[in-house]
Each structure stands twice: as structure tokens, then as C-alpha cells.
RNA sequence: GCGCCUGUAGCUCAGUUGGAUAGAGCAACGGACUUCUAAUCCGUAGGUCGGGGGUUCGAAUCCCUUCAGGCGCGCCA
């Protein structure tokens, strides 16, 4: 609908300008939007206001001329008016809104899908938590946002790959192995002074215990180094399996699990350094190799190879992004915890230095989650082992509620997640409001089936019987869905879907309370069945993007 | 000290990229169940958009400044 209008308006502008011998140019800031108040029409545009400046004319006069022109050649507008300082308000004919039911019926689960992405390849990399401990609630937020964003981009016509980057090499892995090894010895009766900078969590003891049960005491007789190597691999594998399990239960699936270590095995890290060297982006100082990040706006240059010869995490990341480019992604989206924000300029600098346009890489920072219990904060630290895991959150408040809470706010808003509140409010949680709308519709169809009512195909239904304001409102909201998908995909903001679904559910509940659906009035009943069927389909499609279930019963 | 994020109703948050009279949910108050699920609906009340300047036809939104909170400023990852 919005696209249709855009076309009509543009044609009218061209016609108008043409008659005055003025050449048409792109109009920056030209918008067609949905006004907040219904009195301002179904859509409204600021064209006249924007154009008035360059034409040196009164905005209202421009709007007047335009609205007359637009009124000439449209068959879907019932009224075009000039309002306020020079807005043009469009009122769409009721009959047009009713067409959405046919569109939904034709598209079904594809209704709302768009070709905005034109099959371009996008990679969304998210979670990517170090395999040194279970996922906590902050990872959960990143998981919900990343997964839903991937779903959204898929719906918007992109080819999406979801990836998890595993930091399976480096000092923290050695610490993990050592921690497990020490717990192993401790559990076998040795008195151990457990270092404070090692991983303290009980899950480490569990892993050690499992090794004892399977392998016995044999590592006590072996030398330390190979033993730690064994424990490193063992712990990493167990933890990674746990992470995968948690993500699966959170309805999050990754297509690829990318190993940092593989970047070394394939020589990609060396190659990345070579490339930067050739471009003279590196220099040696103080015994280390530095990248000229300041040349691209970062506040200081960054070390790539340390004095002792080992590469930094940053070096891996440059190589990783080189690899991403080489895999041919048109768009690369990294979802990071906001505590890594200081890292952004440096990575952007590296991208540019590699000769890639920095617009290709989007880094979405997801603000940290402040976990609360009964109004007071819960301290969290992987190393100290004091944290609430994603697993516990899923078990306590449920997958659907947790995902919805994460997805009903912008990713850069700070979030206080109160477990007690999330549980105690579960009856009033917005997620149930949306799901309930879906379930209600199911139960109407169930009753229809019980009564032996035959549901007509939409093509046979006389939708012109849908004239009540509640019905028209539903039809309009249903028609907006494809626009919501495109807008959310463009801005990379999945939370818009959640709010849209809340609006749709509200309109459904409102309609439901006002109008009886199953009745003796055959054609009207069929029209109403058609409308709630459409609502149910859109609810289902939207919830799917959010990764939230659409139950038939509650 | 420097940088990034945030500040909107009592609470939790939206606000269509600068638009018209700032909106939801919860909590509060008053109504609606012998009828498709009351996990719902209808109504009332609640605001100097942290404060102060500026930019313009027009600012919660952009700029400057200031206050408050969070997070970063490693040859860690």
C-alpha cells in the first residue's frame, strides 16, 4: 500500500513539475508514513514541506496543487487532503483494505515476506561466548536478538547464515584446562591451593568428576603438560555441548560453528598479517608488531603480534573477518555484548585496511543484562562462578517469556531482568497476551468444527460485509505487516515486530469482545472467520520470527 | 581524565530516523462473564520527554553544555 502511494505521489510530482518546465530531482527526506492519529488519514506525506524550500513557495500551496493532481488518477483513495503546515493526508478506500485477506490467504506462511534483500548473502554472527563456562543471561539476550534478526532478514529476502565463533585457542583455554586438571587432582584427595584467577564454577568440578569416572586416576601418573592438554580438550567439548543444548532449548540454531583455531591451521592469520604488511599498515615497535589503527580513526594503534611472538586476539579477528569477506557475504553483522564497544573502532579500522567498505560490516551492540532478584542485583562473573545461567532462566520463566522480554526493547537499551518479577508477572506478561490472541482464534475454529460449520475459502467470502470499525482496524493492521518487516529489516531492529504483534493482538481482543463470530448470519460469519484466520496467520508468522511459539490452547 | 550507551507516566518500555494533540503494558480507581477462553474488554487518572541553551516552518529525536547511572579505555579474550 505504501509503495503504491509512493509511486502515485512521485508521478504526480513529475507531472506537476513537468507542466511548469522544472526538471525533477530526487527529493531528500521525502516520506510516506503512518500518522499517529487516525484523523490524519491512513498515510500522510511531508513532500510538500520538503519541496517548498527549493521551489521557494508556500508549503500549503504546493500541497494543494499536489493533492489535486494525486486525486485525479487514483482508484484506491477515498480522500486526499491538505492539513497542518502542509501535510498531505491520504484516506484509503475501505475496499482496498479488504484485499489483504486474499493476499494473506495466497501467501499463508509467506505473507509478509519481501524481496528487499534480493537474495543477497548476509552473515549474522552471534552469541560466540567463550567455551569456558555455561551461557548466562546476557548471552541469552544476544541469542534472542541475533536469532530473531536472522529470521527477520530471511523474511526480508536475504540469504542468511548464522554463525557462532568459537574462541578455542589462547590463554583462557589453557586456564580452563588447568582449572579442570586441578579440580581433578583435588577430587582425588590431593590438597590443592586453587588459584583465584582460575575458573571457580562447580561445572568445572562436574567435568573433572566425569573424567574420574571414565578414566580413573591415570592422569596423576602422567606429566602435567599432556594432562592439561587432555583436560582442555575435554572441558571445552563438554562445555560446548552444553552451550549447544542451551541454545537449542532457547530455539536458537546456528548454521556454522567457526573455530578460531582453524584460522591458524589454514594459515589465514598469517595471510591477514601479510596483506596488511603489503599495504604498509603494520610497523614494528617495542619488540611488537603494530597495526596503524589510528590511520582509520581509532584512538591508538593496536598490537597484532606480541613481543613473545604470539598473535593477539585482534589478529585472529582480522583474519576472521578476512575469511568472512572471502566467503562472499554482502553484509556482515556482528552481535556483541556492549562491554566490547571499545573494540568497534579497531575492527572497523581493520576492515578498511583490508580494503573492504566499512558499511559492509554492521556491529550491533547488545547492552548488558542486569540480573535482579526481588529488586536487588545478582552479581555475575564467569570466573567466580557466581552467575545465573541461561538454562536457569529458561527453566524459571520459560523460553517464550524470556525471548519476548529480550525482544520488546531496543538492543541498546540497558535491561534490568528481574527473575522474580518475570515469574510473578507471568500472567500479565505481554507474550501471553499475543499468544492468547492466537489461541483464542484456534478455539473459535474448534467450535466451528464442533458445530459442523463449513469454513469457506476466502475467494468465496463476501468481505464487503466487514464494515465495523474494529474490523477495518484489523484489516489495516494486517496490511501493515509487510511494511513492518521491511522497516525492521532495514533498521536491523527485530523489536519492532514484537510491538507490532502486541498491536495486532490488542485489535483482535478488542474485536473479539465486541463481535460475536460464530452465529446464524452465514455470510457475515464467514467474513469474520476469514478475518480472524488472517490475523492468526500473521500472528503465527510474526511469532515465528521472534522464535516464540504460537499455541492453539493456553 | 578520555570514549561509548542510557535518562520519556509511580514501575517496565515504545516513539515510524525532524512531523501534527508524546503512546502501550503493569500498578491505581470505576465498570463488563448463564453466550466462540475474563491470560480478555471498556472507561478514569497519571508527563516541564533529567536540567539549561541553540539550530528551523516544526525537536523526545539534531548540535553545545551540564547532571545522574551503566560500560569500556592491556603486548587479556
Image (cartoon, rainbow, N blue to C red):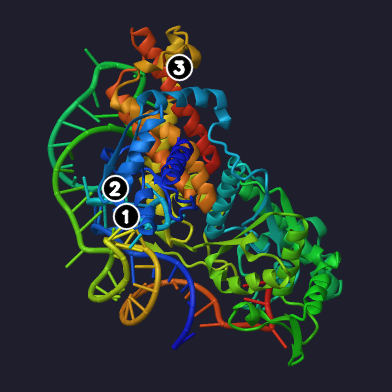
Distance between mark 2 and mark 3 Cα atoms: 56 Å
Distance between mark 2 and mark 1 Cα atoms: 7 Å
Q: Report which residue position mark 2 lands on.
A: A61
User: Picture coordinates of residue A505 (x, y %)?
Assistant: 39, 34
User: Picture coordinates of residue A268 (x, y %)?
Assistant: 82, 67
Judge from the rendering whether residue A187 lies leftward or rightward of residue A424; answer left or right. right
| Quadrant containing the N terminus of chain A in the rendered view | top left
Q: Please name whichever residue, A443 or A181, is drawn nearer the observer in this view of the structure.
A: A443
Label 2 environment density (alpha carbons within 10 Å; few <14, some 14–19, many ≥20): some
User: Picture coordinates of residue B36 (x, y %)?
Assistant: 36, 19
Proximity of marks 2 and 1: CB atoms separated by less than 8 Å: yes
Nearer the camera: disc 2 or disc 3: 2
Label 1 environment density (alpha carbons within 10 Å; few <14, some 14–19, many ≥20): few
Nearer the camera: disc 3 or disc 1: 1
Residue pictured at 82% horizontal, 59% vertical: A215
Say above or below: B23 vs A177: above
Proximity of marks 2 and 3: CB atoms separated by less than 8 Å: no
Amino acid at each position: 500500500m505504501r509503495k503504491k502511494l509512493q509511486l502515485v505521489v512521485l508521478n504526480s510530482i513529475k507531472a506537476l513539475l513537468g507542466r511548469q518546465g522544472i526538471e525533477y530531482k530526487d527529493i531528500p527526506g521525502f516520506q510516506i508514513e503512518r500518522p499517529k492519529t487516525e484523523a490524519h488519514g491512513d498515510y500522510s506525506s511531508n513532500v510538500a514541506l520538503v519541496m517548498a524550500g527549493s521551489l521557494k513557495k508556500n508549503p500549503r500551496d504546493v500541497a494543494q496543487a499536489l493533492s489535486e493532481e494525486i486525486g485525479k488518477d487514483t482508484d484506491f483513495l477515498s480522500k486526499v487532503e491538505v492539513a497542518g503546515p502542509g501535510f498531505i493526508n491520504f484516506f484509503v478506500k475501505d475496499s482496498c483494505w479488504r484485499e489483504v485477506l486474499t493476499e494473506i490467504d495466497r501467501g499463508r506462511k509467506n505473507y509478509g515476506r519481501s524481496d528487499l534483500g534480493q537474495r543477497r548473502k548476509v552473515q549474522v554472527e552471534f552469541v560466540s561466548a567463550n567455551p569456558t563456562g555455561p551461557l548466562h543471561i546476557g548471552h541469552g539476550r544476544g541469542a534472542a536478538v541475533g536469532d530473531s534478526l536472522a529470521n527477520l532478514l530471511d523474511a526480508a529476502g536475504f540469504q542468511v547464515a548464522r554463525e557462532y565463533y568459537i574462541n578455542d585457542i589462547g590463554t583462557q583455554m589453557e586456564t580452563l584446562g588447568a582449572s579442570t586438571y586441578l579440580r581433578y587432582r583435588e577430587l582425588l584427595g590431593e590438597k590443592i591451593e586453587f588459584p583465584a584467577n582460575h575458573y571457580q564454577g562447580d561445572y568445572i568440578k562436574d567435568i573433572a568428576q566425569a573424567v574420574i569416572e571414565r578414566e580413573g586416576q591415570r592422569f596423576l601418573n602422567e606429566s602435567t603438560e599432556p594432562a592439561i592438554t587432555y583436560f582442555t580438550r575435554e572441558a571445552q567439548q563438554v562445555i560446548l555441548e552444553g552451550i549447544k543444548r542451551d541454545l537449542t532449548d532457547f530455539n536458537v540454531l546456528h548454521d556454522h560453528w567457526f573455530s578460531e583455531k582453524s584460522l591458524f591451521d589454514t594459515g589465514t592469520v598469517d595471510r591477514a598479517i601479510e596483506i596488511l604488511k603489503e599495504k604498509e599498515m603494520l610497523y614494528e615497535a617495542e619488540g611488537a608488531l603494530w597495526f596503524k589503527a589510528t590511520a582509520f580513526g581509532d584512538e591508538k594503534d593496536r598490537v597484532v603480534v606480541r613481543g613473545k611472538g604470539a598473535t593477539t586476539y585482534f589478529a585472529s579477528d582480522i583474519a576472521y573477518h578476512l575469511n568472512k569477506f572471502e566467503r562472499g557475504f554482502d553484509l556482515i553483522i556482528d552481535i556483541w555484548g556492549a562491554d566490547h564497544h571499545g573494540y568497534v573502532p579497531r575492527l572497523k579500522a581493520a576492515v578498511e585496511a583490508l580494503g573492504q567498505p566499512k558499511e559492509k560490516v554492521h556491529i550491533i551492540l547488545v547492552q548488558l543484562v542486569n540480573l535482579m532478584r526481588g529488586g536487588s542485583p545478582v552479581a555475575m562473573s564467569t570466573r567466580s562462578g557466581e552467575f545465573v545461567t541461561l538454562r536457569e532462566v529458561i527453566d524459571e520463566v520459560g523460553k517464550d517469556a524470556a525471548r519476548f522480554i529480550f525482544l520488546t526493547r531496543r538492543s541498546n537499551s540497558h535491561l534490568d531482568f528481574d527473575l522474580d518479577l518475570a515469574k510473578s508477572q507471568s500472567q500479565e506478561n505481554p507474550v501471553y497476551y499475543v499468544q492468547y490472541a492466537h489461541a483464542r482464534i484456534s478455539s473459535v475454529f474448534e467450535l466451528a468444527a464442533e458445530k459442523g460449520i463449513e469454513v469457506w475459502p476466502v475467494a468465496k467470502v463476501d468481505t464487503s460485509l466487514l464494515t465495523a470499525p474494529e474490523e477495518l482496524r484489523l484489516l489495516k493492521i494486517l496490511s501493515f505487516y509487510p511494511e513492518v518487516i521491511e522497516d525492521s529489516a532495514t533498521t536491523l531492529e527485530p523489536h519492532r515486530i514484537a510491538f507490532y504483534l502486541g498491536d495486532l493482538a490488542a485489535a483482535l481482543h478488542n474485536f473479539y469482545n465486541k463481535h460475536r463470530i460464530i452465529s446464524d448470519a452465514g455470510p457475515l460469519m464467514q467474513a469474520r472467520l476469514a478475518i480472524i484466520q488472517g490475523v492468526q496467520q500473521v500472528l503465527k508468522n510474526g511469532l515465528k520470527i521472534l522464535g516464540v511459539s504460537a499455541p492453539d490452547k493456553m
